[in-house]
Image (spheres, rainbow, N blue to C red):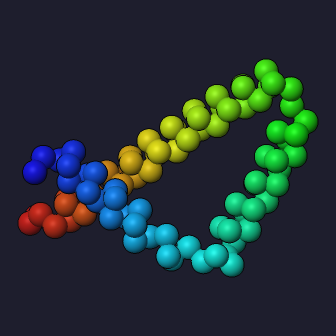
Amino acid sequence: MDMTNIFDSLMQAIDEHSFPYVSPKGEYQREVHRAEQHLEWLEEHLNEEEKAHLEGFRNAELSLSTMECEASIKIALAVGIRFALPS
């Protein structure tokens, strides 16, 4: 199994097993709800061209967020492997 497959498997396992630890009544969920309310208001007040730009921004933001998460996991794995190796 190559490193890409190992990384993809780890990402999937983290996604599947970490969500239950985010409390539906916790701060994270409140912030998600608040952000959705702001986004809903904004979308109601934009024209079609502005909505297209907003959608482009959201797609770019999602891509960046995904890259940041993957980088964090790679760093954590590298640190874990480094600590596991004999000195």
Instruction: Count all numbered tags in the image, as a single digit.
Output: 0
Residue at (44% x, 50% y) in the render: 69
Task: Note whether 24 is above or below 5 in the view shown.
Answer: below
Q: Report whether residue 76 is seen.
A: no
Q: Position of residue 8 (x, y in %)?
A: 28, 51
Task: Note whether 75 is above or below 59 in the view shown.
Answer: below
Q: Residue 34 vs residue 28: left or right?
A: right
Q: Report whether residue 80 is seen.
A: yes
Q: Quadrant of residue 48?
A: top right
Q: Residue 34 vs residue 41: left or right?
A: left
**In the orientation shown, which residue stands out farthest toward the top?**
49
Q: Position of residue 42 (x, y in %)?
A: 85, 41
Q: Quadrant of the C terminus?
A: bottom left
Q: Residue 6 vs residue 10: left or right?
A: left
Foreground of the two, 25 or 48: 48
Q: Position of residue 80 (x, y in %)?
A: 25, 63
Task: Note whether 76 is above or below 3 in the view shown.
Answer: below
Residue at (72% x, 31% y) in the render: 54
Foreground of the two, 34 or 81: 34
**In the orientation shown, which residue stands out farthest toward the right?**
45
